[in-house]
Image (tube, coloured by chain):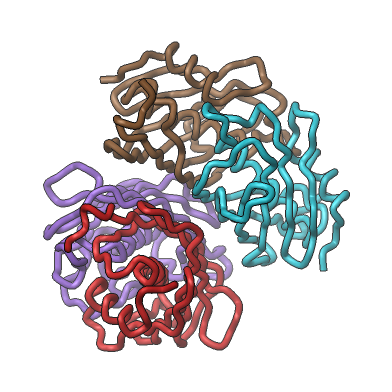
Chain colours: A cyan, B brown, C red, D purple
Amino acid sequence: MPKLNASELEELIIQGFPDLRDDAWRIEAVDENYVRVRMPYHRSNLRPGGTISGPALMELSDVAMYAAVLAMIGPVMLAVTTSLNINFMRKAEQVDVIGECRLLKLGSRLAVGEVAMHADGDDALVAHATLTYSIPPKDQRPA
Amino acid sequence: MPKLNASELEELIIQGFPDLRDDAWRIEAVDENYVRVRMPYHRSNLRPGGTISGPALMELSDVAMYAAVLAMIGPVMLAVTTSLNINFMRKAEQVDVIGECRLLKLGSRLAVGEVAMHADGDDALVAHATLTYSIPPKDQRPA
Amino acid sequence: MPKLNASELEELIIQGFPDLRDDAWRIEAVDENYVRVRMPYHRSNLRPGGTISGPALMELSDVAMYAAVLAMIGPVMLAVTTSLNINFMRKAEQVDVIGECRLLKLGSRLAVGEVAMHADGDDALVAHATLTYSIPPKDQRPA
Amino acid sequence: MPKLNASELEELIIQGFPDLRDDAWRIEAVDENYVRVRMPYHRSNLRPGGTISGPALMELSDVAMYAAVLAMIGPVMLAVTTSLNINFMRKAEQVDVIGECRLLKLGSRLAVGEVAMHADGDDALVAHATLTYSIPPKDQRPA
């Protein structure tokens, strides 16, 4: 069962992914090995041609994975991304993007998850990422 | 031979990667199939513990690849990332990070490149990425 | 709807993945954007310690993606893998391994799919791969 | 400095990558964090159209990484691949393929390396892979 709820995760994301923008990431659902995150549309993420930028989608996948891992293990702030692989499949235009993370493995030292991303209101995938996270061993975590 | 110089590339990056921050990416070297980019240290990229964030390094690799491709083919703004794979290897602390992109393939439709990232003044790799870019065919580019 | 059935796909895999072994890959299910493949256990795939080798799992994911793409577009033999990303999560011992491919995108030129692999009789993932395939344009395919 | 020479590595590869074929992988050079491996051409690796198959190149990259890691840490047979990312760039025809592995990081628990692959006698890259390896901690290695 998840150890953290949506608002606790939103607070941890603000600490973990500091940003100059004033509209926060929103956690819309938390379940066993699953988190759904909304990235609100804002102008600064647009590439020429009016599409959501690649780096914004990479960050969405990283935020979703971070939230999914912390939801299951609790607020272990030193969990860090060790790898990310992302494929961009379609353009997303001026809308919110939804990222759904499913954990494929949650071991004591390593987590693997995938994040499917689609524009709000359209099921077609915009991008798909696979990430690995390193989880610090229990005796090395701050009290 | 590169078709664009460092200041032309910096201008294209500002258009291609709009940002709220006021310190720009800096192109430090441009050569055949090679670009070196400096990501200036600024607070907003820090994760808890004082290390440069993963998404900031992902964006550095994407900016370096974008610059390397445009340097060789000219200002084709519709060149877009189709995939990115990144491994994080060491923590980078409160310093500038240097990204060096080498193109492994530059075809008429697809480019593949790798980006090695290290902290300024330290050769040890902080992260390493491989990216693919889709290049629009010549007859579909804006005049 | 799929254009090819399981036995037609098995025949194409024999042509596409020539091998010295005499036990073939088996297609167990074909559906819209989905194929399930069985890799029979055989000694030659074992690594020291008695676990299924990494290259055998890589080939399973490539075979499953190949079958899923051909099932949907028909016997276009020149469809080729352009990239593969795989994470190994658990050891698989001396059993058949099942690979389930789901296509995430099937465009006219590019397909993206993921392959979840687990040991026969155990749902826990052994490995997970994401692949991209290049599909030759219709006017360049052999008649 | 490498702890193993080319013939010692070839022997470990035979144990680590059992195969029904009778022509072995050949280690052509071993240096600090670097190994060069030759994959002899043999018919069974060909795809339709006469090109070297993707899975054969994946295995080449895995063999090269395995050799590079063992060269540096000694015969730790339980070192295993945890992830592989490969991009295919050009077709290789009926020739030997050379894989050059460079270790990007060699930590006590994790190694990261890249493998550049080209046809014998042609510098253009056929494929490029990035791999991560898990290294068992010293106290868990067989004596």
Q: Quadrant of residue C26?
A: bottom left
Residue D58 is situated, as x and y percent measured from the top left of the image, at 33, 61
Q: Which image quarter: residue B48?
A: top right
Instruction: Write the residue at 37% across / 53% down.
Output: C108
- Coordinates of residue B87 in the picture (x, y in percent): 52, 47
- Left or right of residue C34: residue A61: right
B115 horizontally vs C118: left or right: left
Q: Is residue B129 left or right of residue C83?
A: right
Q: Is residue A47 visible?
A: yes
User: Residue at horizontal 21%, vertical 53%?
Assistant: C140
Q: From the viewer's perspective, is residue A75 above or below residue B73?
A: below
Residue D141 drawn at (x, y percent) = 52, 70
Q: Outermost residue, top direction?
A: B7
Determine whether, in the image, residue C73 is placed left or right of residue C30: left
Q: Residue at x 33, y 40 (%)?
A: B110
Q: B101 or D14: nearer the eye?
A: B101
Q: Position of residue A133 (x, y in %)?
A: 63, 54
* Residue D86 appears in view: no
Residue shown at the point (32%, 25%) measured from the top left? B73
